[in-house]
Image (cartoon, rainbow, N blue to C red):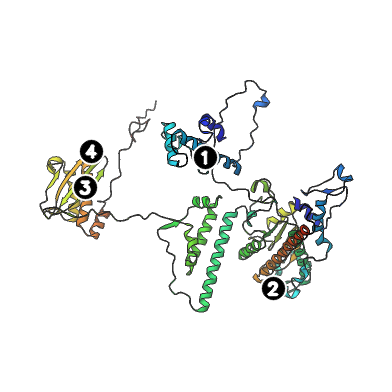
């Protein structure tokens, strides 16, 4: 299988290179039957069963991988003992340069555990007795989880009853600190249990977990609950405010950058009180003859009511006139944050002044004249 | 398969021991020309002795000491359903009905329960797989715990179609099916007979079942008329089955130890 497709380069590496599509490898036949009876040529292929890899097969693949890793290290002139996966990737990219765009289609050499899907070992012993007491349900991992979870619910209820009997029942329930987290998705649960779950099973599981969480003394089972939750990355909801600096003359100023399409702009906002605007060394009236662009520049100041207070020194490059104006507008809004209070900054955010505009030019598609425009349709 | 042959022997369908039929270590019954002449091998005699012991002795596992009719009464095993729910085939097991509530005859229950516990003990002694089935949601956790504590198996969830009849596809090749199925409640969630009763019958698996007055006892091999709705009654049944299975397994370990000590030259089976 994998050995066959790797035999092409196997002479170098001892059959350890696996191409990414190793789940359905191409068998290379070096000697073809020239003549044969139809009976020999006809292959009775039975119904396709999902490939199951035995433990011995995986073990053999792991050994071959280790040997191949050492060969590769020797070839590259590096130390075989400290040859990490990054070194392997680098070496393979060097020895087998590929121009394919899809990274997953390029040659790769990874540990068999990452390539072959995780499978369940044989479920019963030599005498035929299954190992798990819920084997005959067909979904032993899922039902065992539900059994365990229900047992914990009963335990918490019993604890609550004991507290109530002693008169120590807590009036303010101590909630589990869930933090920024969510329940594991169905796919993640399937990966955890190594067993497919149906949608209804998953919903039952979540319902029972929610029931456990709704109980006042659920903090007993905090660890169990958190093991089935995925932590979300703490998303910083607030803008990074540029620091307010003081120059030699004692004037407050702050710097910020902004981008729009392919324009890059940066601005220095000084708290002078003059209201002058310089863009790339020129006056803004010269640089932006169109009213619309100047309006874009002024809008953040006009929104906060600080039109005549600040002195702006802008520099911008790339893009066209409109995108340069948009880049500068964003830069000015960000720089102004350091002069404003939090509520005013929040008002700016809600007005959309602090949101970078994500729109870029859409590519032209083949068979069409432009990104959306189709060729003229002719009836005949 | 090995224990199916054993169970057959244990349940009174004694296989003919003699030159015509030889039971090899794998448990398959076959007759060969050589077996007619040659004597039985030494290894079989130890195993046969161990397996014949419960059949020779009356009530080796002391099942009759486990409960009395009074215990059954205290556990409300005699309480059946109302006259309207009564199954026609349960009428022989009913003692009377008071205010239209059926009362199960506890003498019959005691006798049937003893027989059922005996069968379970013998199966467990022979190393058979016992599967507990109950589709009552209140007692699902209790039944699963019982199975876990006595080292046997339980199925208290939704019954997927071919679990017995399509076992090789459902579980994989070479799976061993249960040797005894114990129904702690023969009805499923919609008050119809559990599919596993019919499937076990199809696969020649003996069944023990607690049949209430609204259940059909005909397909069950060892029916035990009794209440399957009250928690006290269910706890009693679970406790009894657990005790009996543990006793049988301990006895088996004892016998194996005894035989391995008394005949150390023999290879232990």
What is the spatial separation of the Cα atoms under label 2 and label 1, in whole angstroms?
65 Å
Nearer-the-camera pick, B148 or B179: B148
> Chain for mark 3?
A
- Which is closer to the viewer, label 4 or label 2? 4
Q: Report whether residue A47 is seen.
A: yes
Above or below, A109 against B23 in this view is above
Residue indicated by mark 3: A329
Quadrant that contains the C terminus of chain A: top left
The residue identified by callout 4 is A318
**Picture quadrant where residue B156 is located:** bottom right
The kind of secondary structure element at disc 4 is loop
The residue nearer to you, when weighing A330 against A91, is: A91
Badge 1 element: helix
Image x and y of residue A161, in percent: 53, 74
Up the image or down, A41 lies above or below B34; here it is: above
Residues packed near mark 2 inside 10 Å, few (<14), some (14 to 19) or many (20 plus): some
> Mark 2 — residue?
B75
Q: Position of residue A239 (x, y in %)?
A: 28, 54
Q: Are marks 1 and 3 on the same chain?
A: yes
The picture places residue A189, in percent across and down from the top left corner, at 51, 53
Task: Tell me the subunit letter for badge 1.
Answer: A
Q: Earlier in the sequence, mark 1 or mark 3?
A: 1
The residue closer to the viewer here, A354 or B44, is B44
């Amino acid at each position: 299988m994998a050995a066959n497709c790797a035999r092409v380069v196997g002479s170098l590496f001892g059959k350890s290179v696996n191409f990414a599509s190793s789940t359905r490898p191409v068998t290379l036949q070096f000697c073809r039957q020239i003549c044969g009876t139809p009976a020999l040529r006809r292959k009775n292929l039975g119904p396709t069963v999902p490939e199951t890899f035995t433990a011995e097969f995986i073990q053999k693949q792991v050994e071959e991988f280790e040997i191949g890793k050492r060969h590769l290290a020797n070839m590259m002139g590096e130390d075989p003992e400290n040859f990490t996966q990054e070194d392997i990737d680098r070496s393979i990219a060097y020895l087998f340069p590929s121009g394919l765009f899809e990274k997953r289609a390029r040659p790769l050499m990874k540990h068999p555990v990452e390539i072959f899907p995780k499978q369940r070992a044989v479920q019963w012993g030599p005498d035929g007795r299954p190992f798990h007491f819920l084997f005959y349900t067909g979904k032993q991992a899922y039902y065992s989880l539900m059994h365990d979870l229900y047992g914990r619910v009963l335990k918490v209820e019993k604890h609550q009853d004991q507290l109530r009997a002693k008169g120590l029942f807590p009036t303010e329930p101590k909630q589990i600190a869930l933090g920024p987290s969510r329940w594991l998705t169905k796919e993640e649960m399937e990966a955890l249990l190594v067993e497919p779950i149906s949608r209804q099973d998953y919903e039952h599981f979540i319902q029972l977990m929610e029931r456990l969480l709704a109980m006042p003394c659920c903090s007993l089972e905090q660890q169990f609950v958190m093991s089935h939750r995925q932590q979300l990355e703490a998303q910083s909801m607030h803008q990074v405010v540029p620091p307010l600096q003081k120059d030699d003359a004692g004037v407050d100023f702050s710097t910020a950058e902004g981008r729009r399409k392919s324009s890059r702009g940066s601005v220095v906002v000084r708290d002078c009180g003059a209201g002058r605007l310089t863009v790339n060394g020129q006056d803004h009236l010269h640089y932006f003859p169109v009213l619309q662009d100047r309006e874009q520049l002024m809008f953040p100041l006009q929104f906060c009511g600080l039109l005549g207070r600040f002195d702006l020194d802008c520099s911008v490059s790339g893009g066209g006139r409109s995108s340069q104006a948009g880049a500068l507008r964003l830069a000015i809004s960000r720089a102004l944050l350091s002069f404003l209070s939090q509520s005013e900054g929040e008002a700016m955010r809600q007005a959309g002044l602090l949101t970078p505009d994500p729109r870029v030019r859409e590519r032209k598609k083949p068979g069409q004249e432009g990104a959306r425009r189709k060729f003229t349709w002719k009836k005949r | 398969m090995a224990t199916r042959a054993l169970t057959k022997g244990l349940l009174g369908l004694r296989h003919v021991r003699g030159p015509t039929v030889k039971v090899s270590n794998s448990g398959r019954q076959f007759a060969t020309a050589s077996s007619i002449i040659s004597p039985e091998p030494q290894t079989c005699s130890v195993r046969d002795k161990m397996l014949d012991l419960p059949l020779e002795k009356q009530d080796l596992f002391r099942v009759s000491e486990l409960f009395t009719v009074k215990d059954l009464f205290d556990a409300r095993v005699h309480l059946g359903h109302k006259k309207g729910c009564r199954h026609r085939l349960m009428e022989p097991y009913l003692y009377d009905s008071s205010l239209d509530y059926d009362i199960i005859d506890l003498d019959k229950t005691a006798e049937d329960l003893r027989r059922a516990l005996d069968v379970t003990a013998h199966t467990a002694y022979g190393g058979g797989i016992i599967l507990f089935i109950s589709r009552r949601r209140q007692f699902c956790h209790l039944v699963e715990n019982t199975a876990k504590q006595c080292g046997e198996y339980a199925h208290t969830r939704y019954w997927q179609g071919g679990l017995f009849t399509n076992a090789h596809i459902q579980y994989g090749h070479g799976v061993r099916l249960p040797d005894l199925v114990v129904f702690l409640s023969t009805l499923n969630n919609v008050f119809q007979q559990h599919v596993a009763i019919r499937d076990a019958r199809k696969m020649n698996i003996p069944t023990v079942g607690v049949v209430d007055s609204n259940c059909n006892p005909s397909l069950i091999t060892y029916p035990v008329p009794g209440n399957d709705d009250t928690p006290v009654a269910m706890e009693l049944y679970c406790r009894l089955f657990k005790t009996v299975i543990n006793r049988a397994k301990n006895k088996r370990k004892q016998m194996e130890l005894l035989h391995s000590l008394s005949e150390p030259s023999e290879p232990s089976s």
